């Protein structure tokens, strides 16, 4: 059933508790925390502008980092308040707490169209524990609830789930924000009945992270293209050599089951036929986690199926990239999650870039709907300047994967039905 959205709400003069995803990357410079990327803040502006135009009194709540129940100053949302105020060209109040008397007082002074940002909800352990008493305290000043934090909707926390339950129990409305609505539309409805050919392209590190997504998309897709390190688990399962490539030998059975399902359903399921390989050499240094730092030398194209014993695969090869790109250019629906290789290193980025261009081409020239399932594929598209040339890029990482798996997200389930 469809969920209520912020468009459906009549919130003039009402106090609306809005859960947003302001978990932005920050770094410390000269003793000050600076925001490195404001995309997540920008994404919430349409919902905020709509609520302002409706005359709501807006109470914004979010988490930042993992302070584990402590008041960790480097994880304060105060810098976000400053930036958000600039972006909206409006004054915005900030309270250094998310519950209690100070919050009640600040809410009482809010005018219609006014905004207040609360301090990091994860300064309290009760947030992640979804503690009912804490949820009731958060909800104390709310007549209605809006969730625009898709990236946090897979967690049943007090601000993503508990508050909605309290507001709903009092007869208040709980609605999806405009960003949340778009996420549900593209990752949900649009993939329910995709126009054919529906090409799914999956990459990234691990089969185990994405096997449930593969399994679900095997119900809908015409073609599945596999890249990234996850391809090596499939290759290993098929008896091919993968050298020292990152792979999961204990997931061979899972990979074989997916291949068998694809065959039964006559779905084209393609693996790389050539690879960019390199030789790992230990530098003798350790990283922050105490693991040896490797250097990858002599990158080259291995045109055979097998990867020699002393080498490691880091990207799909040019022949595979071209074959995948040709298939993508014919597609009418594309779902892409995960890079084709270790794209953070320029030497291993060509496969991901070729795919990104093909996805953009299919969208512009073939009228394809292209949906990018969050995480590193979004980063890769933005890096290549193609971010605005696809139909939709999800803001969720874990949340998009869980939604694509067909799981019910607690933050979505708690919203009112239309
Ligand atoms: P994921 O979060 O599962 O989408 O994985 C993304 C990460 O996988 C990126 O950081 C990539 O660098 C990494 N990755 C992709 N392909 C490879 C590969 N062949 N070898 C090592 N890492 C890879």
Image (spheres, grey):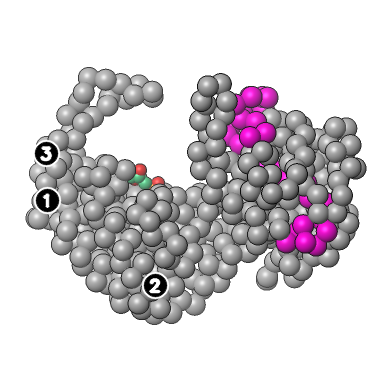
Residue 64, magenta (yes or no): yes
Residue 270 position within the rendered picture, expressed as x and y whole percent measured from the top left: 25, 65
Residue bounds of the magenta highlight: 50-79
Q: In which quarter of the image is residue 387?
A: bottom left
Question: Sequence-wise, which precedes: disc 2 or disc 3?
Answer: 3
Residue 42, magenta (yes or no): no
- Does mark 3 have its CB less than 8 Å from ligand 1? no
Q: Quadrant of the C terminus?
A: bottom right
Please give the residue where the numbered disc 1 appears in the rendered image: 301
Q: In front: mark 2 or mark 3?
A: 2
Vertical relation: 9 (above or below) 278 = below
Q: Whole-Å distance between the Cαs marked 1 and 2?
A: 29 Å
Q: In which quarter of the image is residue 71?
A: top right
Q: In which quarter of the image is ligand 1?
A: top left
Q: Is mark 1 on a helix, strand or loop?
A: strand
Residue positioned 83% across, 51% down in the render: 57
Left or right of 39 in this view: 348: left
Q: Residue 149 carries which label?
A: none
Q: In front: mark 1 or mark 2?
A: 2
Whether residue 276 can be seen here: yes
Whether residue 258 can be seen here: no
Left or right of 78 in this view: 332: left
- Neighbour tally class for label 3: few under 14, some 14-19, many 20 plus, Cα within 10 Å: few
Residue 408 position within the rendered picture, expressed as x and y whole percent measured from the top left: 60, 58
Vertical relation: 356 (above or below) 309 = below
Q: Is mark 3 on a helix, strand or loop?
A: strand
Left or right of 241 in this view: 155: right
The answer to whether mark 1 and mark 3 are in CB contact below 8 A is: no
Number of callouts: 3
Please give the residue where the numbered disc 3 appears in the rendered image: 298
Please give the residue where the numbered disc 2 appears in the rendered image: 363
């Amino acid at each position: 059933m469809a969920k209520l959205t912020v468009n459906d709400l009549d919130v003039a003069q009402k106090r609306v508790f809005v859960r947003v995803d302001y978990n932005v990357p920050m770094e410390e410079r000269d003793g000050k925390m600076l925001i490195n990327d404001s995309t997540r803040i920008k994404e919430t502006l349409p919902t905020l502008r709509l609520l302002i135009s409706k005359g709501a009194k807006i109470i914004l709540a979010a988490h930042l980092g993992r302070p584990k129940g402590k008041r960790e100053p480097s994880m304060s949302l105060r810098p976000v308040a400053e930036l958000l105020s600039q972006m909206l060209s409006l004054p915005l109040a900030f309270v250094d707490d998310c519950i209690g008397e100070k919050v009640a007082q600040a809410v009482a002074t809010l005018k219609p169209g006014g905004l207040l940002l609360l301090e990091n909800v994860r300064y309290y352990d009760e947030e992640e524990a979804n503690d009912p008493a804490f949820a009731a305290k958060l909800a104390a000043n709310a007549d209605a609830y809006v969730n625009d934090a898709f990236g946090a909707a897979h967690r049943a926390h007090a601000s993503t789930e508990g508050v909605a339950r309290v507001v709903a129990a009092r007869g208040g409305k709980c609605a999806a924000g405009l960003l949340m609505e778009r996420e549900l539309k593209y990752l949900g409805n649009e993939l329910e009945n995709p126009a054919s050919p529906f090409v799914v392209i999956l990459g990234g590190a691990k089969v185990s992270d994405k096997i449930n997504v593969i399994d679900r998309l095997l119900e809908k897709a015409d073609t599945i293209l596999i890249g990234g390190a996850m391809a090596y688990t499939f290759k290993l399962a098929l008896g091919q050599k993968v050298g020292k490539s990152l792979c999961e030998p204990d997931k061979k059975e899972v990979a074989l089951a997916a291949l068998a399902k694809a065959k039964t359903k006559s779905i084209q399921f393609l693996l790389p036929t050539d690879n960019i390989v390199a030789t790992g050499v230990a530098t003798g240094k350790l990283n922050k986690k105490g693991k040896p730092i490797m250097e990858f030398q002599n990158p080259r194209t291995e045109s055979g199926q097998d990867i020699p014993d002393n080498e490691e695969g880091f990207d799909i090869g040019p022949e595979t990239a071209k074959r995948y790109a040709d298939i993508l250019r014919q597609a009418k629906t594309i779902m892409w999650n995960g890079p084709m290789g270790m794209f953070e290193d320029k030497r291993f980025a060509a496969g991901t870039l070729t795919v990104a261009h093909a996805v953009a081409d299919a969208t512009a020239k073939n009228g394809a709907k292209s949906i990018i399932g969050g995480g590193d594929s979004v980063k890769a598209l933005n890096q290549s300047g193609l971010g605005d040339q696809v139909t939709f890029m999800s803001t969720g990482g874990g949340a998009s994967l869980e939604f694509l798996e067909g799981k019910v997200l607690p933050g979505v389930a708690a919203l009112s039905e239309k």
